Amino acid sequence: MAKQSPTIHLFCCANSVTEAELQELQTRFGVDGLKTLRLPCSGKTTIPYLLKAFEKSADGVVLCACPESQCKHLEGNLRASRRAEAVDGLLDEIGLGKGRVLVVAKEQGQIEKLIDGIQRLQTELGKAHSAGVKPGRTVLAGARTGNRRENAA
């Protein structure tokens, strides 16, 4: 059986990623390797929303936000970063380990920064999978945290 690359779900701010850049990412990583969701602001992501990506099919999540102090919605990028940290902590608590959630602060035109982040995460997740760590979807499908921490972030 052929070795499959880890599936990454990309949540991106509409102010930092253009449609053309999304097309370039889809071409580079393929439909099965990268699932994308464009948001009006990265701050619109919530903890349950990010966890749902792991439950559905993601091995890792990349959250693309505006650079610090450049968010058009004032603090959306800061909220997104805090929520990503919280999700990474939850994944660690349930035994999947940290490092499955990556936040990339990207300005328009810096597509290589985002590509590098996605490739780095795929490489790290591939190493973890080779070492016997199961992909997130296997464990999370039956996990219940019962903890609604999205309002704290």
Image (spheres, rainbow, N blue to C red):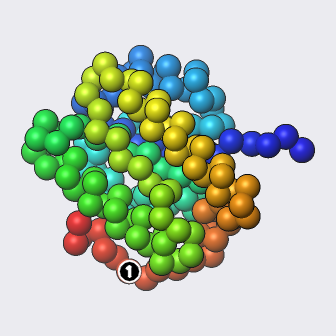
Q: Please give left or right for residue 11 compared with residue 119 in the image.
A: left
Residue closest to the eye, 29 or 149: 29
- 108 horizontally vs 90: left or right: left
- Tell me the residue that label 1 is attached to: 147
Q: Residue at x 68, y 65 (%)?
A: 133
Q: Give residue 2's quadrant in the image.
A: top right
Write the residue at 60% across / 52% down.
125
* Residue at image coords 38%, 30%: 113
Q: Position of residue 105 (x, y in %)?
A: 28, 39
For the point 20% across and 52% down, the residue is: 78
Residue 60, image x and y in percent?
Answer: 53, 52
Residue 31 in the image: state x and y as whole percent: 62, 32
Where residue 134 sits: x, y (%)? 69, 64
Relative to residue 98, is residue 80 depicted above or below? Answer: above
For the N terminus, the quadrant is top right
Q: Is residue 123 visible?
A: yes
Crowd around label 1: few <14 · some 14–19 · many ≥20 (10 Å): few
In which quadrant of the rendered view does residue 28 lie? top right
Q: Is residue 61 above or below residue 143?
A: above
Q: Is residue 46 above or below residue 104?
A: below
In the image, is 12 to the left or to the right of 128? left
Q: Residue furthest bottom?
A: 146
Q: Secondary structure at mark 1?
A: loop
Question: Is residue 35 something that shows in the picture?
Answer: no
